[in-house]
Image (cartoon, rainbow, N blue to C red):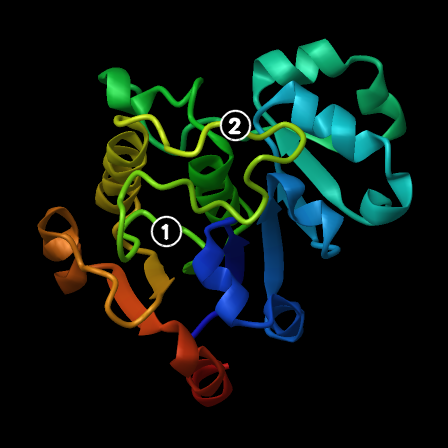
Amino acid sequence: MSNPVFIIGNGQSRLQYDIRKLKKYGTVIGCNALYRDMKCDHYSAADANMVKEMLEYPDKIDQSTIWTRESSYKELWPANQKHKIKMYPPEPWPITHKMDFKKRWGSGVNAILLGHHLGHTDIFLLGFDLFAIGNKREENNVYKWTRNYSPHRKMKRYLKLEWQTQMLHIFSMLYESNFYYVKLPGASEPDRFAQFKKTCLNYVNIYELDQFLKVNY
């Protein structure tokens, strides 16, 4: 197996694992407010307000690169010159229809594409709680109701479906990569993702992740 990259979302499932241990195995890309709790190699923050918050704490991000969408990058000028802020890389596929165009994609899915852009073929996803146990609309972000996060108790109906659709597109276009979806036991494996288990998608029980990494890396 190749050197892995770990994409850390902020679904509450990741609280069941000490994500700090991942740095010894490979590159770590954290999403949004993860900077508050852990230094990562890279951060994905699509929204300009989140990046502005991060810049208020330079000691937490001084060794990291922050990636953001083009509109946010332009809004942040000239802070880009003082800090390591970069625009998300372009789509790694020909743009032929609207799903190819990721201008408005969020931090999580852009972080997955960033892992691919950095040359990794083994891509681990933690804290991507698209198929959480229990109330599907209950807000389950680690940083819910804090600065730069929604004040609502329930997620918008379309959000998880939108994220699933974007991830399906990534799996279909980057099928030569190995995606390891780390989840809680009991969380569903949706029918929409089933076709990719034959090509690029693998599920890993979060409580068995340590052993999986020790054996394979």
What SS does tag 1 mark? Answer: loop
Q: Residue at x 35, y 64 (%)?
A: 183
Which disc, if any, is residue 129? 1
- Asked whether, in this view, residue 169 is left or right of residue 25, the answer is left
Q: Which residue is mark 2?
A: 150
Give the residue type at disc 2. Ser
Measuring from the top left, give residue 130's x and y in whole percent: 31, 47
Amino acid bearing label 1: Asp
Q: Position of residue 54 (x, y in %)?
A: 77, 34
Question: Residue at the spot x=67%, y=30% of the render?
Answer: 147
Note whether 149 is above or below 104 in the view shown: below
In the depicted structure, whether residue 5 falls above or below residue 155: below
Task: Give me the residue at 54% from left, 30% from top.
Answer: 89
Q: Confirm whether residue 4 shows in the render.
A: no
Q: Is residue 3 above or below residue 120?
A: below
Q: Is residue 93 visible?
A: yes
Q: Is residue 25 left or right of residue 97?
A: right
Q: CA distance from mark 1 to mark 2?
A: 17 Å
Q: Which quarter of the figure has residue 207?
A: bottom left
Which residue is painted at 61% across and 39% down in the image? 32
Of mark 1 and mark 2, the one earlier in the sequence is 1
Question: How dense is the environment of label 2, judged by Cα within 10 Å: few (below 14), some, or many (20 and up)?
Answer: some
Left-right relation of 209 to 46: left
Q: Position of residue 84 (x, y in %)?
A: 79, 34
Q: Secondary structure at mark 2?
A: loop
Between residue 186 and residue 3, name the one nearer to us: 186
Find out whether the residues at labels 1 and 2 contact each other: C-beta distance under 8 Å: no
